[in-house]
Amino acid sequence: MDMKRDYYEDIRLFKSNVVIFWTVVLLIALFTAPLYIDSYNVYLLNIIMVHVILAVGLNILVGSTGQISLGHAGFFAIGAYGTALLMMKFQIPFVFAILIAAFIAAFFGFILGLPALRLEGPYLAIASLGFGLTIMHIIGGMDVFGGRMGVRAPPLDLGIQQLGLTWILKTDVQKYYLILILTILLVVGARNILKTRVGRSFVAIRDSDIAAEVIGVNLTIYKTLAFAVSAFYAGVAGGLFGFVLGFFDPFTFNLILSIMFLVMVVVGGLGAIQGGIMGAALITYLQYDLFKNIAEVPYLGAFLVAVSKQWFTLVGLENFNAMAIGLIMIGIIIFEPLGMFGVWIRLKKYWMTWPF
Amino acid sequence: MAAPGCATALAAVTRERNYERRPASMDHFRVENLSISFGGLKAVSNVSFSVDRNSIFSIIGPNGSGKTTIFNMISGIYKPDQGRVICDGENMVGLTPDRIARKGIARTFQNIELFSNATVMDNLMLGRHIHMKTGVFTGAFMWGPRSKAAREEVKNREIVERIIDFLDLQSIRDSFVANLPYGKRKLVELGRALAMEPKILLLDEPSAGMNTEEKEDLNIWIKDIQDDYKVTILLIEHDMNMIMGISDRIFAMSQGEKIIEGTPAEVQSHPEVIRAYLGEER
């Protein structure tokens, strides 16, 4: 154990040199990753990072404040459509477009937070679910948003057209660096929020709202604030997601997506930043990549294809993917209720006392 | 045990920061004709009392006589049907609990209301909520020790550390409240209320569930809080030794109504109090 000399040491980002070392290793790995992985995996990493942003934001709401939301695909959609349309229709530079879209999402988060003042648990889940579906159908029903045909994302131009500056990110690798930097900023931001006054107030509301009020936490402000912050994260994530996909329609942001976001948070670990990151990484990987090449595995592939044709729906091998995700989820919840964050904590303890 | 040295140092700090602006009026805290009923049952009817600055005012009475209900009305959790709660000339009735907390009224609960999945430190820092300003953006941009958010954290952390010293909580500073024994939780809740630097401190059965030794410590602490923090303390308690030992005034009630208000000696010998507590002789 090292001695502490200053109260700031308890809240600073890097608690020891060991942490600094591993952070640097991780950062180097992340920044050099595109050099030695193929472009499909860069694309996958982009999606993972977008989901990390969203899951970290959702975890502030679900894990730290104790409010459930099944409507985050709605905020995600607002971010994606908002950014793309602001850039296409109003020629607003990307940086401002994504910020404005995220604040619009945050505003809708605030609106959804209002019923949350009266609703709890399953009732809130239903209300937020309704919100997510409504957003999806409103977007699908209006021509401004491209209707059911969807929207093609504009070129990702980091420059400001009006000043004659253009810096268009074309490849997945270029987008990777943009998303990586934003992810790091937002994750550190979330961590800082949770370490300071606002984050503590969120936790207070989760653990005992009556005590929170009695110590001076205004429930109306902080509950709606938790929704707004969470929706802001979803908005930024959505804005980036649009460019990763390149093309999206209203049904990209369906109910299943909202549920998968919640699954990421629960599997990763409620109320922990690392939980959101690990959950998003694992679930996204499982969803996109797990059984991608299984049809080519000798014997097993052919067998699964046959089983799928005989018994399952036309979707084919994706059925097995869904089943595998379900099993892994059940397994984690049964054996490690704290999620992957619980595993992380135990590993850390183990290494701290190693080799004893 | 309480460390008087630390307590005095803390008192000096709190006094110079907060306490000099108070007027020296005698009418410090007053409850007027407070009444509330729950579906026809009159839980509290027409209770009035007035508390001197920096005194210990105890409320006693049998179970269900409405003591905690009075606290709930003062702290804004219940809205009284009629009556007023006046603190330094301001009426508290109708304000939300968080507004009342900002006016300087802190409380503890009979059945401990702590944030159990947070550490003792976080619980105490939450007591500083009303004295801090960091918002979402200032908080999110806590880059380095010189940032606004970090400086505010450290400043308030110092005040919390003094309370930790005062209540002897050093060893459990980073424990989660859920893992603490009952007596310690009571102390953490007291510490959280103290961290608010209140003018009025409402303590709802602080010694419940404590053993004799812990009760003795608590006795000393409450006296110290009165002396060092210059707080007015309203106390609900069942332990008669404690009540008689530390109270300046006692308010005895039964079935929502006042029996008598007076000094410990007066209350102790009042026939109705004896009857309410021991039952009637037939």
Image: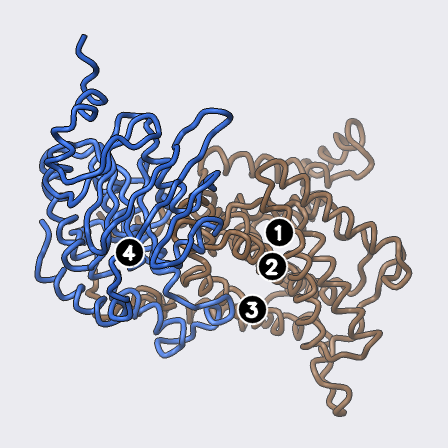
Chain colours: A brown, B blue
Which residue position holds label 3?
Answer: A33
Residue B204 picture quarter: top left
Residue A38 picture quarter: bottom right
Label 2, label 1: how far apart the Cα atoms are = 8 Å
Tags 2 and 1 both on a single chain? yes
Q: Which residue is more in the foreground, A243 or A95?
A: A95
Dot 2 and dot 1 residues touching (CB under 8 Å): yes
Which residue position holds label 4?
Answer: B27
Label 1, label 3: how far apart the Cα atoms are = 39 Å
Tags 3 and 2 both on a single chain? yes
Q: Earlier in the sequence, mark 3 or mark 2?
A: 3
Chain for disc number 3: A
Judge whether residue B181 can be spotted in this image: no
* Mark in front: 4 vs 3: 4
Tags 2 and 4 both on a single chain? no
Q: Residue at x 45, y 24 (%)?
A: B41
Q: Is residue B246 above or below residue B136?
A: above
Q: Is residue A212 left or right of residue A119?
A: left
Q: Earlier in the sequence, mark 1 or mark 3?
A: 3
The circle on residue A113 is 1
